[in-house]
Amino acid sequence: MSPTVISKIFLAMFLWAACFPLITAGLQYAPHLTFATMRAGLAGAALVGLAMILRRPFPRGWRTWLTLGIVGIGATSLGFLGMFHAAEFVSPGLATVIANAQPLLAAILGVVWLGERLPKVGWVGLSIGFMGILVIALPQLLDGGQEGSAIGFAYIVLAAVGVTISNVAIKSIAGKVDGLFAMGLQLLIGSAPLAFAALALEDQNAIQWNAVFTASLLGLALFGSALVYWLWFSVLEAVELNRAIVFSFLVPIFGLSIGALFFGERLSGIQFSGIALVILGIVFVNLKGARRSQGR
């Protein structure tokens, strides 16, 4: 894996982690689904507009459009729905654990759907990484974090499954279509169900336009959606899904780091142990992948 690809992965994971405080800030001034719709629509329009300016090739073929539809419904409709709603019902610790089962699910689908191979040590690495997530979330789980409603579980599982399927779908077209158009169109496709739900269920006049909301919306749309999806697409053009997806375990680590640096939160010794396990798991998966690639 080249330094450029690794840099893109780390930047993407950091941007995904930074989304959570921006969502929290913005939700004080707008209804959930309306906020999610605006984020997806603005991000999609930005990417499609840039692709048109650069005269990138427009996606063609019904299979390509079917795949973009799957990505849009999975990553944007279900992913954003779960992300914006789950916090109301389930503790952050439990949400972290459930959401980060996604790399394991994606690796399984990568083997079944894409025909990727992951050796035993790779599965061990994924398992170690997930154990690290459990350890990181342990303080919250022990502090009443196990409480949560069935609807909260449903939102998180729905989001995790949607994102998992979308990652496999993205990998299936990576390198075959233009990334700017592909990710922009999936965001626009995924925003449509969110928009219908927002119009039916929420009061659009409840939006409070101010500096905080505007900054949150622009940050989420342009950096936490448009840029991050283009980065992720370009990563999957270069490496196998099961080698890239393990880096998703870094998202809660970056989230903890953001909390410590900007919000005065303190990391416990047990959380540092979890971070070490996550890093070890990533090394296990990718060292084996590097050796296998060199042996070809």
Image (cartoon, rainbow, N blue to C red):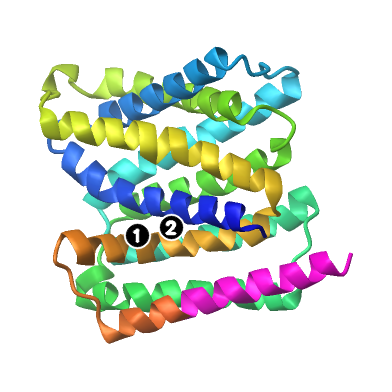
Q: Residues within 10 Å of mark 1 (few under 14, many from 20)?
A: many
Q: Amino acid at mark 2?
A: Ala
Give the residue at x 22% y 24%: 202
Q: Secondary structure at mark 1?
A: helix
Mark 2 in CB contact with mark 1 (< 8 angstroms): yes
Give the residue at x 57% y 57%: 6
Q: Residues within 10 Å of mark 2 (few under 14, many from 20)?
A: many
The percent coordinates of residue 36 (x first, y second) are 32, 31
The percent coordinates of residue 92 (x first, y second) are 28, 61
Give the residue at x 75% y 48%: 113
> Quadrant of residue 107 in the image?
bottom right
Q: Nearer the viewer, residue 84 or 177?
A: 177
Q: Amino acid at mark 1?
A: Ala
Q: Does 212 appear above or below 105? A: above
- Pointer 1 residue: 95
Q: What are the residue bounds of the magenta stretch? A: 277-296
Q: Quadrant of the N terminus?
A: bottom right
- Pointer 2 residue: 99
> Quadrant of residue 40 in the image?
top left
288 within the magenta span? yes
Q: Secondary structure at mark 2?
A: helix
Give the residue at x 37% y 32%: 222
Cα–Cα gap, marks 2 and 1: 6 Å
Q: Is residue 193 visible?
A: no
Q: Does 264 appear above or below 159? A: below
